[in-house]
Structure formats: C-alpha cells, structure tokens
Amino acid sequence: MNYLVKQVVLGSVIGLMSMGLSGCGGAGVTPEHQAQVDQHAQMYTQVGMFVQGTKVDTLNFTLGFPVPVNSIVFYEDINSKQLAFTVDDKRFYIRNNPRYSKTTMDQMMDRYFGTQKVDLSKFTDAEKKAIASNKVEVGMSKEAVILAIGYPPAHTTPSLQQDEWKYWKFQHGYAQDTIIYHFKDNKVSEIQD
C-alpha cells in the first residue's frame, strides 16, 4: 500500500511539473526572439499602431492611442497569444490573432518590431508628416500607409497587391466601422470612410 501511494504521489508530482513547464516557452517563437524578450531588448516599432486601453490587436483597429513608427519600445514578456512591451514606461500588449493576421508570433514580432529604425528618407515630406501622425492621406504610397497605420487585416485584404485595403476603426459584436483605402498606381487615390 505504501508503494502504491508513493507511485500515485510521484505520478502527480511529475504531471504537475510537466504542466508547469508546458507554460514556459509556450510562445513558440525562435530562440532569437525569445532571447530578445528575456533580455528586455530595446526595439523600434516598424509600423504605426494603435493601442485601445492597453492592447494592440493584429486585427489592426485604427482607433485609439497612436504609437508611431520608430518609437522605442522594450520587450517585457511573451506567451502563445501576446507580447508585452513598454513605451515610455507604459505597459502594453500586442495580441496576435492569426485568424485575421495570418501570421505566426514570430512573423508578427518581425512586422511590428525591429532592432533598427525604419529609414524614412525615401518618402516625401508630406508622407513623412502623415507617417509621424499615424494618418493616411491621398497620394501616399502603399509602403507609407503601412508605416503610418500598420498592415491591413489579411482576412479582408489577403494581398498587398490589391488596390483596395480595408481596415477597421472598431468592432464591438456586430457593430463595426470600417475605412477603405483605394489605390491607383500604388498611391492612395480615395479614402472611403
């Protein structure tokens, strides 16, 4: 009987340990990305983004507190669904929703953050001003739009080659408000708000 109790206890301890360890590294990211998070690396935003409350969603709502491209951020921690980071000592979370972003956590991290600033020298003065303000204006290139407000959700804009990009301002249940950017010759030709 004593032997049986010991086996049950040992089995329970091993089970609990394996459950506890399964949370570690649960983000499923490359060792390089994990090391950057573990070291609380200083990074630069590679696109503009919007924070609603404390969350950035890869569905990419274009409403909320703007964080422009080339903002300095510090990685905090990561799990399989989100990455915590700080901007000006404020903690935020970017939540990857692969159903809409069509990206893995690694791809999401590469899209949103990098070790170097984005070179803006090739953009016009008007584009630079719009990018810095997280705004889209007629005449901006597709690349400038991405730098200003991030990537369009891939489930409604599956290819960046399309000449119509759809973004959400917000979505609550069935209520939603969208904005569509129309392009001609790689430039914004119309904004359908």
Image (cartoon, grey):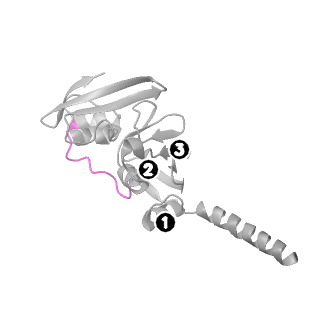
Our reading of the magenta stretch's main secondary structure is loop
Alpha-carbon neighbours of circle 1 within 10 Å: few (<14), some, or many (≥20)?
few
Q: As rendered, which of 80 and 117 lies closer to the eye?
A: 80
Q: Earlier in the sequence, mark 3 or mark 1?
A: 1
Q: Name the residue under label 3.
A: 92
Instruction: Establish if 83 lies above or below 31.
Output: above
Question: Dividing the image into 4 quarters, which one contains the C terminus?
Answer: top left
Residue 151 image offset from top left, x and y in percent: 32, 41
What secondary structure is marked by label 1?
Answer: helix
Q: As rendered, which of 108 and 74 lies closer to the eye?
A: 108
How many labels, in total?
Answer: 3
Residue drawn at x 48%, y 60% as measured from the top left: 28
The mark found on residue 35 in the picture is 1
Give, as a single range, the part of the protein colored magenta. 114-125
Residue 59 image offset from top left, x and y in percent: 41, 38
Q: Which of marks 1 and 2 is nearer the N terminus?
A: 1
The mark found on residue 171 in the picture is none
Q: Name the residue under label 2.
A: 72
Residue furthest toward the bottom?
Answer: 3
Q: As rendered, which of 182 and 130 lies closer to the eye?
A: 182
Query: On the image, which quarter does residue 191 sit in?
Result: top left
As for residue 118 lying within the magenta part, the answer is yes
- Callout 1–callout 2 Cβ contact below 8 Å: no
Q: In the image, what residue type sits under mark 1?
A: Ala
Residue 138 image offset from top left, x and y in percent: 21, 28
As for residue 82 lying within the magenta part, the answer is no
